Image: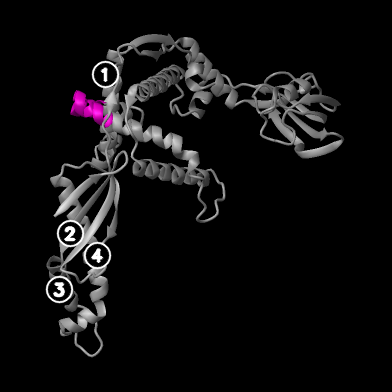
Amino acid sequence: MSNVETLDGLQRRLTATIPQQQIRAEVENRLKRLGRTAKVAGFRPGKAPLKVLEQQYGSDVQQEVLGESLQSSFAEVAIANKLEVAGYPQFEIKTADLNAPEIEFSATFEVYPEVAIGDISGEQLERVAFALSETDVEDTIATMRKQRAVYQKVTRGAQKDDQVSIDFEGVLDGTPFEGGSAKAYKFILGAGRMLADFENAVMGCKAGESKSFQMTFPADYHGKDVAGKQVTFNITVHSVEEPKLPEIDAAFVKSVGVADGDVEKFKQEIRENVGREAQRRVKVRNKESVMALLLKVAKLEVPTSLLQGEAQRLMEQSVRDMEARGMKIPKGMKLPMEMFLERAEARVKLGLILAHLVKQQNLAAKPEQVEAIIEEYAQSFERPDEVRRWYREPARRQDIENLALEDNVVAWVTAGAKVSDKQVTLNELMGN
């Protein structure tokens, strides 16, 4: 017999029993199998009596069988009652005597919520659009030239794009402050590595020149000791160097990966690569807008078990990312779970919303969509056939199917909402 009761919100409690006969039969079967190989003092392998095996291994085997019986009994009742279980149940054995004719247990768990999608026909959805221009191609090439610039010393005053080497010391209320000094520190004026007021003070300075100036740190500056405060900097300029950009010739083109040095082929590759990356970012931006709209119009409860599980995954991923960037993380260190709850809630909600829409609106990925995405990825690599094979492996193909599914959801929302298009520049897309 079993009973399912509704608790608060999505919580449910199942109460059921397991016949002792079922547990004992399975325990006996496992002990017999164990006896074929178990080493028991005083007996040859496979010859130990069942009673001896029970004395030595019975308790552990009974716990193992009981745990599995709880899981299977719960699963049977959940299926019979058409319960969509979210997360893992918490079991509690109610029977004090584990040798009683029946073992009563309860399982507390959550079910998946009902998802209600509001009317999107009146919702505004801004969709970004981008058209690659020759100026974008030229600007990209100019950036590549700057990245390969050779710096040469000059005697004039420093100006934008020059590389300077300076000593500097910052003083707050007459005392040097932590992190406010360096020797022979190099940076490029206008690159944004230093605060704008600091760079402006260096502008026009020549090699060998020293000066003092005052500046006020931004109120939100990461160094709390000086945030929002006025300080004095003393600087000495050691060198000023101007950039000498490489010519766009065969040597330059070969240095960036075009083996035959063909300048026109190089420009075409830049055009294709920048266009492909820009469209990828357009797609991501528009998908984010759609997901934000769905979060706005959907109504649903979030299962606590799924929320905590997702927050845990985000926390672990954050620690791995920190380690990948070279940060030393103490073994076993955990970041506060509260840091990840808001993002985890959005991710869980979106997962439930997408699953609901795919089922309700028949938005599952089609094979030709999956192949089109794989082909798009493959064209970005030198050996496209290897990329195709890699993505067609079952686990990776599932990831591509999920992307196609999201594309279908984006198309469905876009078709139903009030869409306005906004043309964006390459710099806006790239976050510059």
Q: Secondary structure at mark 4?
A: loop
Residue of label 2: 17
> Which numbered dot is residue 95?
4
Q: Which image quadrant: the N terminus? A: bottom left
Does 289 sit above or below residue 180?
above
Q: Secondary structure at mark 2?
A: strand
Q: Residue at 34%, 21% (x, y): give it.
A: 297
Query: Marks 3/2: CA distance?
Result: 20 Å
Numbered marks: total: 4
Residue of label 1: 412
Q: Nearer the viewer, residue 118 or 273?
A: 118
> Which numbered dot is residue 57?
none
Query: Marks 1/2: CA distance?
Result: 47 Å
Mark 3 or 2, nearer chain start? 2
Residue 239 falls in which quadrant of the image?
top right
Residue of label 3: 28
Label pair 4/1, CB-CB below 8 angstroms: no
Q: Residue at 30%, 20% (x, y): give it.
A: 118
Query: Marks 3/1: CA distance?
Result: 57 Å
| Residue 144: x %, y % from top left | 54, 23
Query: Marks 3/4: CA distance?
Result: 21 Å
Residue 371 in sight: no
Mark 3 or 4, nearer chain start? 3
Q: Secondary structure at mark 1?
A: helix
Mark 3 or 1, nearer chain start? 3
Mark 2 or 4, nearer chain start? 2
Q: Main secondary structure of the magenta part?
A: helix
Instruction: Look at label 2 and name its amino acid.
Output: Thr
Mark 1 or 2, nearer chain start? 2
User: Which mark lies nearer to you, 1 or 2?
Assistant: 2
Magenta span covers which residues? 354-372
